[in-house]
RNA sequence: GGCGACGUACCCAAGUGGCUAAGGGAGCGGUCUGCAAAAUCGUUAUUCACCGGUUCGAAUCCGGUCGUCGCCUCCA
């Protein structure tokens, strides 16, 4: 079955066909490093992680670019406030961003270009647009894109640009543009920018927000590439503007598939500064919440569905992961040498898993395929012993799907000597049928987050996933 | 005002015209266990916000109503 994605540009699911056979060129809007990233940001990055991992699972060679916006209004404002160069100001946030990606087990993109390292490319692009008379310079040295020169403007956001002109929220800003809908490609230097500027043939100034994505995607992926992702709030104006300026400059189609991820909500509302309901990933990690539980929570709801982030969801995620891990662990031992009997079940699960993700990354259905297999295998084991070959096949399947989910492996620390001694003394107590002491010790360990399980083969331990 | 999304069990969440409405969590009752845990069995939606319509047939398509949320130049 063919892979299909919902394309914001056409508002329908379309079969995915890469431009170049076997290769997917993917651009994903990255962070503005003026603050720590919040979990809403990471919902988008997790969705993109799912996308890239699934494309790789399907055998594509993926080339992903994620920009790092390290110059913009807020960065300049805050850096100047702290008397820091924008470099000095942004580096800690950039480092924190990568540390957070690692915590959530997000696979690295092939390129993380920074805006400040691509000023010449942006200037060149702006120059091209000015040369084609699709952009103009205003009195203050800013360069604006002339939206009236691009008739398809509004195609992505499905907005009527004429009605925008009268829109209630549109306020005239301090820059001088000919038409209110025109947007800045290049911003002329103003005194409050301090020493943040680049000296170019347009004079002192700095790039507008949208131009970096056009310039950097062109540099690393070419003028026409396969997929561009971001949050729904990037549809307008950011991605609309990217299309306008890119296609105007190159005369080519910019992107074939636009995939947008819905918002993460807290208390059923979008996170926003005014509601002060931001949740930073670091806060959750500092509280000791297991990052894989966060990963699973962000991953397990379809990306075009709003996701209300709650403690209950984290709990349910932790339990789902525990079920997966326990099942995987249970595949060790107690095996018989015999011919495999469950190949059909495993093949079906694999088929269901793939066809679900093929359908616009339907992760809920894909997870259902996995849990159904677990149940079927467990039911089989009520009355039969698992064969070695079956167990190996199931493990291979789980390891394969875990190249996408990435929640199976634990980074569990080993037991301390004290903890090992406690387990040992409990074993002795149990041997002496001293249930009182045995249960007391089990409770002590549970309080430390260690769960003991007794079975005919002996006692095993695992760490509780904390939420 | 313009554009758009959503409303499925106690909670989360698939399903977009046709077999008994996936799956996860939770509860309750069994099996197993020294007791637990894990696993497992049974159980919890004759019904998909509501009202009409189309159809042999609707959670799914169409119209309306109610409710929630988002976008309309900071935003993932």
Image (cartoon, rainbow, N blue to C red):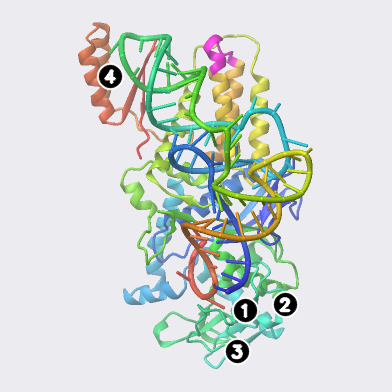
What is the chain letter for disc 4? A
**Residue nearest the observer in this picture, B3 or A7:** B3
In the rendering, at what x and y percent does residue A271 appear?
42, 60
What whole-number distance in Å separates the C-alpha atoms at marks 4 and 2?
A: 73 Å
Q: Which residue is mark 1?
A: A163
Mark 2 nearby-residue class (10 Å; few <14, some 14–19, many ≥20) = few
Q: Quadrant of the N terminus of chain A?
A: top right
- Closer to the chain start, of discs 4 and 2, is 2
What whole-number distance in Å separates the C-alpha atoms at marks 2 and 3?
A: 17 Å
Mark 3 nearby-residue class (10 Å; few <14, some 14–19, many ≥20) = some
Q: Which residue is mark 3?
A: A178
What whole-number distance in Å separates the C-alpha atoms at marks 4 and 3?
A: 76 Å
Residue A75 position (above or below residue A262):
below
- Closer to the chain start, of discs 4 and 1, is 1
Image side of residue A96 versus residue A163, left or right: left
Badge 2 marks a residue whose secondary structure is loop
In the rendering, at what x and y percent does residue A452 appear?
33, 21
Q: Is residue A380 magenta?
A: yes
- Closer to the chain start, of discs 2 and 3, is 2
Which label sits in the foreground, 4 or 2? 2
Q: Which mark is residue A423?
A: 4
- Closer to the chain start, of discs 1 and 3, is 1
């Amino acid at each position: 079955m063919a892979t299909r994605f919902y394309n914001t540009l056409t508002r329908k699911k379309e079969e995915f066909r890469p431009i170049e056979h076997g290769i997917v060129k993917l651009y994903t809007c990255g962070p503005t490093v003026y603050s720590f990233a919040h979990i809403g940001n990471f919902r988008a990055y997790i969705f993109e992680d799912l996308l890239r991992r699934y494309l790789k699972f399907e055998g594509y060679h993926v080339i992903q670019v994620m920009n790092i916006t390290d110059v913009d209004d807020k960065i300049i404002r805050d850096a100047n406030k702290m008397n820091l160069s924008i470099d000095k100001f942004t580096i800690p946030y950039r480092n924190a961003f990568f540390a957070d990606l690692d915590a959530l087990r997000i696979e690295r993109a092939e390129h993380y270009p920074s805006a400040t390292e691509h000023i010449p490319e942006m200037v060149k692009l702006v120059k091209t647009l000015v040369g084609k008379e699709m952009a103009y310079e205003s009195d203050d040295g800013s360069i604006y894109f002339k939206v009236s020169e691009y008739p398809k403007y509004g195609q992505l956001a499905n907005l009527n640009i004429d009605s925008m002109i009268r829109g209630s929220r549109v306020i005239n800003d301090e820059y001088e543009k000919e038409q209110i809908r025109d947007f800045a490609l290049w911003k002329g230097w103003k005194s409050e920018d301090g020493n943040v500027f680049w000296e170019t043939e347009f004079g002192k100034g700095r790039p507008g927000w949208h131009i970096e994505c056009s310039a950097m995607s062109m540099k690393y992926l070419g003028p026409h590439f396969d997929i561009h992702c971001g949050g729904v709030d990037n549809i307008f104006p950011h991605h609309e503007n990217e299309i306008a300026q890119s296609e105007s400059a190159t005369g080519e189609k910019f992107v074939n598939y636009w995939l947008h991820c819905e918002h993460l909500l807290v208390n059923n509302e979008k996170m926003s500064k005014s509601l002060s309901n931001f949740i930073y990933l670091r806060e959750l990690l500092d509280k000791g919440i297991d990052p894989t539980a966060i990963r699973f929570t962000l991953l397990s709801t379809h990306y075009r569905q709003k996701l209300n982030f709650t403690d209950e969801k984290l709990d349910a995620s932790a339990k789902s992961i525990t079920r997966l891990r326990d099942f995987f662990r249970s595949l060790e031992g107690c095996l018989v040498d015999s011919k495999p009997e469950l190949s059909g079940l495993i093949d079906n699960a694999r088929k269901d898993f793939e066809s679900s993700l093929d359908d616009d990354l339907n992760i809920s259905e894909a997870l259902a395929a996995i849990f159904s297999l677990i149940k079927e295998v467990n039911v089989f084991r009520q009355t039969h012993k698992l064969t070695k070959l079956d167990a190996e096949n199931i493990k291979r399947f789980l390891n394969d799907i875990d190249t996408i989910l990435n929640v199976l492996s634990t980074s569990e620390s080993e037991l301390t000597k004290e903890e090992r001694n406690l387990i040992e003394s409990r074993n002795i107590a149990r041997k002496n049928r001293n249930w009182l002491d045995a249960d007391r010790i089990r409770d002590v360990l549970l309080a430390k987050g260690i769960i003991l399980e007794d079975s005919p083969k002996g006692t095993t331990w695992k760490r509780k996933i904390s939420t």
